[in-house]
Image (spheres, rainbow, N blue to C red):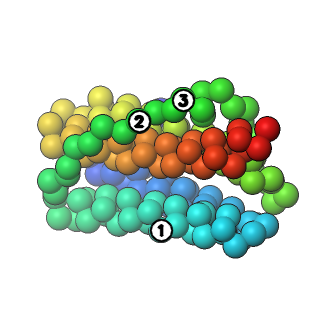
Amino acid sequence: MKEFTNINDILDFAIAREQDAVDFYNRLAGNARNNDMRQIFEQFAREEMGHKARLTKIKEEGIVTLPKEKVADLKIADYTVLDPERDDMTYEQALVLAMKREKAAFKLYLTLSERVDKQEYKDLFKQLAQEESRHKLRFELEYDEYVLREN
């Protein structure tokens, strides 16, 4: 992972990762084969944009208080194979890729929480990790409902 010299470096890195996620979900929405799939990916793009906006605001104004919440983990992402992103992905492949990306974002924020000294920033990155975990859970539930039950 990149070496950071201050909290602004960390926030800039996290903001860039959130923009990557926005772009990813917008691409998936643009390539969706049905309206439901498009709406799901557009919703996630909006949520990731919200993360980016929150990080940008925190960078500009300082820390805000964040709630804590336990998020379930079905661990489906741990047992699926990651395919590279491509235009002709099936719904199943798109869900797997989304789960893996959310899991990676979760791990990123946990790692960032370990690299900062101030408790406020630790709490911020742990909260963002929790939100990414919640996103992964939503994809796992979708995968369980529409892929595993059909097989």
Binning the other alpha carbons within 10 Å of mark 1 as few (below 14), some (14 to 19) or many (20 upward) gives some
**Residue 4 visible in the current orientation:** no
Binning the other alpha carbons within 10 Å of mark 3 as few (below 14), some (14 to 19) or many (20 upward) gives few
Q: Amino acid at mark 3?
A: Lys
Q: CA distance from mark 2 to mark 1?
A: 22 Å
State the residue position of label 1: 46
Location of the C terminus by quadrant is top right
Quarter where residue 57 is shown: bottom left
Circle 1: element type? helix
Q: Nearer the viewer, residue 41 or 2?
A: 41
**Residue 38: x percent and y percent?**
66, 69
Above or below residue 53? Residue 143 is: above
Q: Earlier in the sequence, mark 2 or mark 1?
A: 1
Q: Amino acid at mark 1?
A: Arg
**Residue 151 visible in the current orientation:** yes
Q: Nearer the viewer, mark 3 or mark 1?
A: 3
State the residue position of label 2: 72
Q: CA distance from mark 2 to mark 3?
A: 9 Å
Residue 75 disc label: 3
Q: Nearer the viewer, residue 88 or 34?
A: 34
Which residue is drawn at the image coordinates 66% and 68% (left, top)? 36
Q: Amino acid at mark 2?
A: Ala
2 and 3 marks in contact (CB < 8 Å): no
Circle 3: element type? loop
Q: Nearer the viewer, mark 2 or mark 1?
A: 2
